[in-house]
Amino acid sequence: MPLSGHIAFVTGASQGIGRTCALRLAKEGASVAVAARNQEKLTELVNEITTAGGKASAFPLDVGDEEQIKAAIKAATDQLGKIDILVNNAGITRDQLVMRMKRTDWDAVLQTNLTSAYLCIQQVIPNMLRLRWGRIINISSIFGQMGQAGQANYAASKAGLIGLTKAIAREVASRNITCNAIAPGFIETAMTDVLSEEFKQAAVQQIPLGRVGKPEDVAGALAFLASDDASYITGQVLSVNGGMLM
């Protein structure tokens, strides 16, 4: 298995894209440290991975809390020996037109979606530098590339992830560590389930492939970027959107 011997740390792993990515990494042979706020869902995910013959451990974590990030990554490193694949996937939305957006909603989205990624990267880089191998993969969004009305905070956080990705890629490239981003388009998740059917149909009309994406579409891209097949790719944004941005 291509990722055998590697240890992945995945934030926002309890559901949606993060959960599917954790399952795919385990299927590829990585041991997976899954992190999120929901302990019950994390336990279910760990059980599913181990039942299938994989290796996984749960680390309850609110990425909005810097001390929890430090404690969780230290615990994962101590328990598993290292972390050489980091997937920054945790994300929230607090949608509102900018003229009505509360500062607390701006701050919460930037803290969860962007600042947490910086903090997680900061915690895992020293170990990756010693190993002289690492994969950092940030889950951005098509709306970080094209913007979206009513999502100024979300779009700014996801655009910020792209800038962070490129800066980190330059900082660590000499040590054989790559840093890339994935920008999903419209993907079927709990976050999109709450949208109206009218909105979903309008979105599909903007997608050349004519369908909404699945979490597995993103997980496949992630497995590639984490593998040695992508060893000469860094600082890039892999758009998984069915042609929507085009």
Image (cartoon, rainbow, N blue to C red):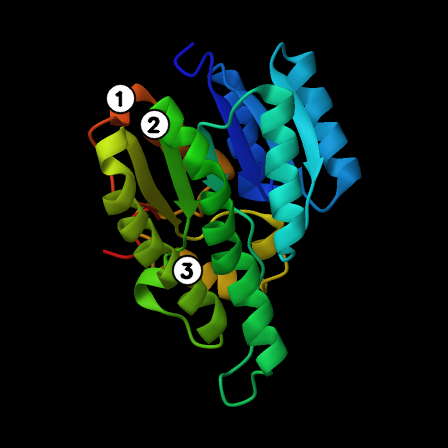
Label 2 SS: helix
47 displayed left or right of 169: right
- The single residue placed furthest to the bottom in the displayed view is 99
Quadrant in the picture for residue 133: top left
**Image vertical order of residue 244 relative to residue 128, above or below:** below
Which residue in the structure is indicated by mark 1? Answer: 229
Task: Kindly report the distance in space between the C-alpha atoms of the residues bearing marks 2 and 1.
Answer: 7 Å
| Residue 10 percent location from the top left of the image | 55, 36
Which residue is depicted at the point 23% across and 45% down? 170
Label 1 SS: helix
**Image vertical order of residue 90 relative to residue 159, above or below:** above
Task: Kindly report the distance in space between the C-alpha atoms of the residues bearing marks 2 and 3.
Answer: 21 Å
**Image vertical order of residue 241 relative to residue 128, above or below:** below
Kind of residue indicated by mark 3: Lys
Kind of residue indicated by mark 1: Asp
139 displayed left or right of 194: left
Which residue in the structure is indicated by mark 3? Answer: 158
The answer to whether mark 2 and mark 1 are in CB contact below 8 A is yes
| Residue 213 percent location from the top left of the image | 44, 44
| Residue 64 percent location from the top left of the image | 63, 57
Q: Is residue 162 visible?
A: yes
Kind of residue indicated by mark 2: Phe
Which residue is depicted at the point 45% across and 75% down? 152
Of labels 2 and 1, earlier in sequence is 2
Task: Tell me the quarter of the image containing the C terminus.
Answer: bottom left
| Residue 164 percent location from the top left of the image | 35, 55
User: Which mark is on residue 224?
Assistant: 2
Instruction: Between residue 5 and residue 200, name the one nearer to us.
Output: 5
Q: Residues within 10 Å of mark 3 (few under 14, many from 20)?
A: many
